Amino acid sequence: MSSFALARGSRISLILFLFATSFCVFALQSGDALMYLALARDFVLNGDWSSRDPYLYSLPNAELVWQHEYLSYLIFYAVHAVFGFPGLILLKTVLWGAVFLTVLRAEPRQRNESWLWIGLWVLAVLAGSFRFIERASLFSDLFCVLLVSWLLPRSRIDRGLLLRISLLFLLWIQVHPGFPLGWALVGLWTLWHLIHTPSFRDYKRLAWLSLPLALMFLNPLGWEGIVYPIRFALNEARTLKEFNFEWLPSYHPLFRFAPETLAFWALSGFASMIVIRERAWMDLRTWFALFAFVAATQSVRFVPWASFVMITAIKPWCELRGRRHFGVKLEYAALALILALSLKNFTTGYKSSSGQRLAHLGLDPKFFPETTTEFLRQRPIPGRLYNTHDFGSYLIWRKMTPIFHHGFVTDMRFYREEVAGVFQSQERFLELVRRHGWTMLLVEKHGAYRYFHRILSPLPDWKIVAEDESSYLIYYLPDSNNGRDESPQNSRSGQQ
């Protein structure tokens, strides 16, 4: 291959990498990242490995399951301690950058120059961009793509592969409970080769695949850490799929016209046509692509890694037939357009299904109640604070506890009856007001407020006292002691 061809391929790969990375650099939107900082501060660094939740007044004896991701919390905390919030955004970008590099380096690399594969790359980036946020699940996204890139070119269990897989799963169980996806990928690879590769049927070698599983017992929860994601999927996840959008299937009507979901369906359609064209029904690459597709349809949170696994799996087949090249001027124009869009994202941000993503390296004010929380700290009133789901982590990080709810609560009865139940009716809201002594409500401006507006409109004693881009702070301020039904009973002291 000529040096010109190599230079052209490198330039295109660099442009594709910059394009994908430009969708990662935006203001921090993940409340979970702040919860990681709080858990590292309050538990890990204090050597406290207990499971009692100290943050809630609504569930005094609640269990707080956090040990399964302790290493993620330490990593986030250490990066934040050194670099602040820009460091967390950089950490996310580095992890996703590793995903992008893994896919771009996958063989055959010359496919990076194919306009068919470039189109699929753009679709994969757009499909996954809604989850380019600061979460521990970043590690599972990366590890799924890494695992596929390791398994695809191999048809035997050698020492190098076994060492990689063992270390990967040992690390995986410390940072995120997404490792059953890795089990499934290794299982698919093993099953395919047992069927199609006679030399693979060396059962002494196959027995070595138990080593990664054995090493996974080296986690703070032991056996419980291994079975935790399975129990979660069979219990808590069932309830979350009813109320929490990130657990909904990607075919849910809520996502019908979301640009990211449309990109995923387009990617899946093109991938299917490529497999049909190649008649590669039983190829291992098709098995991996199909597994990724099925996983993504079951939960929209799996769409990012699944999209990149799909384009990695079908990469050798992503070649235009017939006329292989467009005109040079047209190619340069298309690459210039991709590069210009990348620069626009880096400098001014971009719009996603969750709203505008800002090109700066702090907290996104549309997601965190900074002004209202400061008002609450300075001017509380007697009673307790109600907070919506997304603000719990921020309040804990700001040490504004105890609170009503946060996203790490695993009591699904409480979630169904109180967290979701508060929106059912005015009667249910007033019942919970009396039960918990709420006199203050911290409500999302762009989400839950429409429910509270319907509930509170006939109750004039509930008044908005502060607001910012993300939230309303509502106080119970009766004009007189008129014995209204909405008056909280057993008033309690304000936030500490």
Image: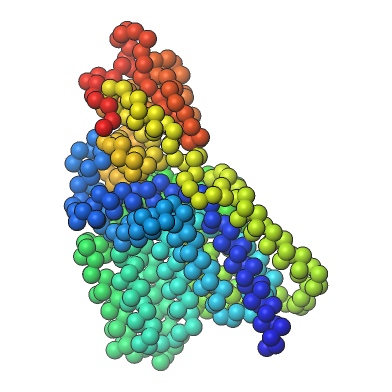
Residue 238, position in %: x, y? 36, 49
Q: Nearer the viewer, residue 416 or 109?
A: 109
- On the rendered image, what quadrant is the C terminus found in? top left
Residue 3, position in %: x, y? 69, 86
- On the rendered image, what quadrant is the N terminus found in? bottom right
Q: Is residue 266 visible?
A: no
Q: Does residue 451 appear left or right of residue 42 in this picture?
A: right
Residue 182 is drawn in which quadrant? bottom left
Q: Nearer the viewer, residue 303 or 480?
A: 480
Q: Nearer the viewer, residue 281 or 294?
A: 294
Residue 29, placed above or below residue 484? below
Q: Is residue 373 visible?
A: yes
Residue 225 is drawn in which quadrant? bottom left
Residue 108, position in %: x, y? 59, 81
Q: Nearer the viewer, residue 216 or 232?
A: 216
Residue 131, placed above or below residue 157? above
Residue 186, placed above or below residue 222? below
Q: Does residue 467 appear left or right of residue 167 in this picture?
A: right
- Give me the residue at 33% from left, 12% from top: 484
Residue 440 is drawn in which quadrant? top left
- Give me the residue at 32% from left, 29% from top: 385
- Give me the residue at 22% from left, 20% from top: 490
Residue 342, position in %: x, y? 64, 59
- Give me the residue at 38% from left, 57% from top: 82
Q: How many marks?
A: 0
Residue 189, placed above or below residue 21? below
Q: How is the image coloured?
A: rainbow
Q: Residue furthest bottom?
A: 199
